[in-house]
Image (cartoon, helix red, strand yellow):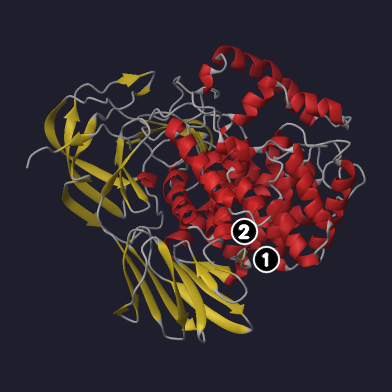
């Protein structure tokens, strides 16, 4: 099975709701972050300044690059070249490249991803030799100074770039370095085979002691990182002692973002070594993590650390962004529909929900059942009081730097190639103009999936071009020029397309329920999760509008649940309209269902959140409940007590 290739971003032009969302991102935080977040200003050390010298510059660049070239945006492209010229001009004998006062491998792993993305977009001849020289540098150094702390947990994060360089050069230094990185990193294959962190983080260590440690350590860490002194590199013995420390391992192996990143490591390494058993290992690990810590959004709780399956648990924005990328990479390596379904589920639901509708502010953590987004204390393990308000960099700045990759990377994964076939394994609207086997191919996906319940591909130019379409389990029909054609649900369909062809994938239009790890139920239509929206008021906190910090509060009653019959809610009314200029508008919804529901009298608040839905709900009045896409909500209920209609 071939590892599929991404196309240059310039070959893919997002349209429809996806184009609108990317434009909002460009006009919002991504295009303006340097004005409001000093760590990404012109003083950043990756640009030659005296500011932040660690992960935040590379994180930002990792999303900025694909966004700029997907939109062909001149201002964003100018920013890309400013960063890239600085990085490509920073080669040195001390750190390989980048700031001299940051000796850590970890930020350079992220920088590699941004560099190879830039190379795909531009073909810039500097990139491949630059990266190959860096890999030779690391191979000489790594036994003396192995990956430390975050770099050990995330040792294989640079593999996308490493394998691109290997394809271009076939240099043996790269497989040798990959083996070294795997050896010095944490064993994530074993982690997912034998997942043992089945309890919330609070069961393994005291929250008070943990937070006290951070209060003491973080200012020191910040001073070290902002210091202009070049630190001494730790030796192999020091690195091993630290990485193997019991508390350090607990912190790293329960850290939600580490887990989100790590899902791809066994898959990518395994496929590279022709070991496809790693796919089952990761799926098993995913099931174990979700069984113990899973939420309706398809991710584990991550308010920095694993915290069980309470419906008011928080999930960090970085975890959503990184798990999306992990599953995109896993899809590219395996062509497995599981990774496609989950990628769509994250990008259509959890990812947009954690931003304001205009993408001028974001949360650090979101809650599936979120009855307020304010500064009141909650049960989160490792966050401060601003963890779920919206702002430029609430709680901690990593998400302000790392948020930029989600939508652009999804867009660039809408089309793959193996050099002969084109693969459409993720769906959203785009225009494709590319060359395959020396022949020009132009195809448009015109439907606004997932808001529209279909994907429609119109072929403007092609000559007997083999194309592979994912046919999700919820596919009802596949039409070729209006005629039904056989297909396998949950499989893939290969067609040879020509100019003028039209392929329609028609999906199920019903609402169904899914069971969650805490015994609650959620409502979805295919890969779109629905929630009951709660009324909200926006309260200004601080900052320059529209990039200001804000709370969302409200006093709407939340204790309701849909009545299920044969696993589905009873639909009373359906409202649908064209997707607006803000696809995830919090007041104008492209989709809204009214369903039959009951009041739940024994569902209360606790610690400024909705308590977990009761397992034995006491119900009273019948009500009509609105359900809208989860991503169209600030305040909401998305995990409900199970109420079955037992009549008939």
Q: Position of residue 626 (x, y in %)?
A: 23, 43
Specify the quadrant of the image occupied by residue 197: top right
Could you classify mark 1 by the number of other residues whose Cα lies within 10 Å: few (under 14), some (14-19), or many (20 or more)? some
Residue at image location 56% in from the left, 38% down from the top: 193
Marks 1 and 2, how far apart in space? 8 Å
Q: Nearer the viewer, residue 199 or 442?
A: 199
Q: Position of residue 461 (x, y in %)?
A: 50, 84
Q: Secondary structure at mark 1?
A: helix
Q: Nearer the viewer, residue 182 or 147?
A: 182
Vertical arrangement, residue 369 with respect to residue 35, above or below: above
Q: Nearer the viewer, residue 101 or 473?
A: 473
Does residue 453 appear to the left or right of 198 in the view shown? left
Q: Give the labeled residue for mark 1.
A: 121
Residue at image location 13% in from the left, 38% down from the top: 645
Q: Earlier in the sequence, mark 1 or mark 2?
A: 2
- Res. 27 in view: no
Q: Nearer the viewer, residue 536 or 382?
A: 382
């Amino acid at each position: 099975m071939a590892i599929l290739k991404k196309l240059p971003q310039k070959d893919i032009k997002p349209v429809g709701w996806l184009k609108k969302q990317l434009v909002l991102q460009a006009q919002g935080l991504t295009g303006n972050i340097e004005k409001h977040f000093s760590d990404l200003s012109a003083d950043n050390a990756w640009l030659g300044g005296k500011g932040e010298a660690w992960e935040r510059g590379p994180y930002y660049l990792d999303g900025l690059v694909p966004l700029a070239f997907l939109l062909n945006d001149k201002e964003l492209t100018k920013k890309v070249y400013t960063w890239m010229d600085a990085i490509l001009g920073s080669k040195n004998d001390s750190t390989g490249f980048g700031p001299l006062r940051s000796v850590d491998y970890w930020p350079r792993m992220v920088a590699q991803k941004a560099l190879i993305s830039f190379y795909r977009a531009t073909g810039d001849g500097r990139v491949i030799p630059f990266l190959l020289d860096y890999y030779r540098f690391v191979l000489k150094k790594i036994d003396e100074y192995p990956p430390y702390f975050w770099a050990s947990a995330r040792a294989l994060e640079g593999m996308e770039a490493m394998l691109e360089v290997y394809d271009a050069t076939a240099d043996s230094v790269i497989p040798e370095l990959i083996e070294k990185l795997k050896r010095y990193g944490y064993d994530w294959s074993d982690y997912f085979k034998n997942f043992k962190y089945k309890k919330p983080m609070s069961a393994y260590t005291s929250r008070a002691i943990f937070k006290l440690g951070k209060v003491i350590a973080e200012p020191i860490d910040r001073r070290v990182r902002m210091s202009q002194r070049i630190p001494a590199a730790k030796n192999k013995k020091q690195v091993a002692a630290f990485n193997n420390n019991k508390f350090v391992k607990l912190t790293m192996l329960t850290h939600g973002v580490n887990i989100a990143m790590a899902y791809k490591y066994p898959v990518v390494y395994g496929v590279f070594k022709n070991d496809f058993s790693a796919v089952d290992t990761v799926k098993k690990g995913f099931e174990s993590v979700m069984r113990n810590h899973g939420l309706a959004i398809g991710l584990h709780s991550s308010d920095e650390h694993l915290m069980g399956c309470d419906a008011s648990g928080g999930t960090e924005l970085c975890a959503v962004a990184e798990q999306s990328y992990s599953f995109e990479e896993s899809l590219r390596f395996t062509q497995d529909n599981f990774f496609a379904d989950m990628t769509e589920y994250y990008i259509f639901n959890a990812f947009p929900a954690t931003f304001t509708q205009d993408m001028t502010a974001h949360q650090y953590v979101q809650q599936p059942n979120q009855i307020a987004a304010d500064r009141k204390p909650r049960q989160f393990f490792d966050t401060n009081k601003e963890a779920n308000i919206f702002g430029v960099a609430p709680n901690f700045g990593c998400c302000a730097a790392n948020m930029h990759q989600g939508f652009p990377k999804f867009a660039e994964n809408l089309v793959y190639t193996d050099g002969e076939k084109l693969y459409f394994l993720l769906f959203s609207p785009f225009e494709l103009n590319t060359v395959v086997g020396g022949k020009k191919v132009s195809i448009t996906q015109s439907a606004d999936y997932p808001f529209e319940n279909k994907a429609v591909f119109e072929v403007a130019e092609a000559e007997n071009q083999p194309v592979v379409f994912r046919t999700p389990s919820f596919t009802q029909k596949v039409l070729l020029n209006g005629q039904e054609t056989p297909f396998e649900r949950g499989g893939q369909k290969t067609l040879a397309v020509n100019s003028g062809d039209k392929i329609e994938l028609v999906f199920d239009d019903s609402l169904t329920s899914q069971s969650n790890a805490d015994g609650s139920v959620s409502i979805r239509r295919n890969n779109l999760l629905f929630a009951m929206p709660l009324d909200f008021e926006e309260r200004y906190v601080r900052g320059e509008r529209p990039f200001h910090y804000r709370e969302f509060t409200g006093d709407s009653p939340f204790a309701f649940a849909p009545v299920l019959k044969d696993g589905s809610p009873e639909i009373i009314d359906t409202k649908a309209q064209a997707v607006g200029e803000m696809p995830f508008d919090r007041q104008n919804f492209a989709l809204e269902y009214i369903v039959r529901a009951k009041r739940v009298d024994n569902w209360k608040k606790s610690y400024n959140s909705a308590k977990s839905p009761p397992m034995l709900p006491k119900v009273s009045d019948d009500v009509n409940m609105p359900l809208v896409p989860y991503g169209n909500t600030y305040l909401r209920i998305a995990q409900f007590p199970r109420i079955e209609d037992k009549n008939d």
